[in-house]
Amino acid sequence: MEICKKKIVKNTILISFFLCILIKPGNTDLSFKNFESKKVSYIDFFMLKFENKLAKRSLYLRRQLMALRVQYSSVGVEVDFNKKKENIKIIIYTIMDKQRYSKKKYSPKLSDCNQVRNLIFYNKYGYKFFTQKRDPALSEDVMKDIFKTVFFKNISFTEEEKFFLMDKMYVEVTIYHPIKKTETSCAGRVNDFELK
């Protein structure tokens, strides 16, 4: 949450800086028409909207009153578009709750890493509670349907464009253990059944 606030402050400072460059003192011709003539690519618009949505959905990982999963003190989300590789990389990093895991001996597993992705993108654990085995109810088809509903809402992409974008999105999740100073990571396509 702190990392998201820092990112918002950083983005606000950058926007202010660019506005200062655009708005020069003594420029009497400046009006909103100047801004209307600026072109923003559709991918830039989508990326901004997508990253904001992910930042809001990262709140699904906040601490629980009754812990049913790993508890996190901080979650950060970053989205980058790589023009050369023509893909979108989503980086999610979490820090386990220091107070809780200084008393409890627990090392994060691959299933915890996948649960972080599942909760942010699909608002589902994707694993059975007692066995911690993958729940087939959250299949790749279900994941794609949820993803389309949540992230492509109010955006005029065709079905083909939606599937193209989903196929070009890669996610990397890292969980940091604050006491052991270790990390667990997993990565893959955003809608892969299981990240590795």
Image (spheres, rainbow, N blue to C red):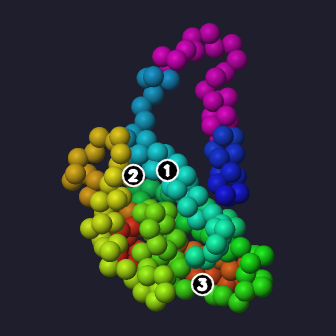
Query: Which disc is residue 151 wearing?
Result: 2
Does residue 166 sit above or below 195 in this rendering? above
* Left or right side of 7 for 92: left
Which residue is painted at 31% across and 63% down in the image? 144
Does residue 133 sit above or below 76 in this rendering? below
Q: Residue tagged by mark 3?
A: 108
Does residue 33 sit above or below 55 in this rendering? above
Q: Residue tagged by mark 1?
A: 53
Residue 170, position as x, y percentages in the image: 41, 67
> Which region of the structure is painted magenta?
14-34
Which residue is painted at 63% across and 30% down in the image? 19
* Left or right side of 49 for 163: left
Q: CA distance from mark 1 to mark 2?
A: 7 Å
Question: Which of the two labelled residues, at mark 1 and mark 3, occupies the earlier sequence position?
Answer: 1
Labels 1 & 2 near each other (Cβ < 8 A):
yes
Question: Which of the two labelled residues, at mark 2 and mark 3, occupies the earlier sequence position?
Answer: 3
Residue 109, position as x, y percentages in the image: 55, 86
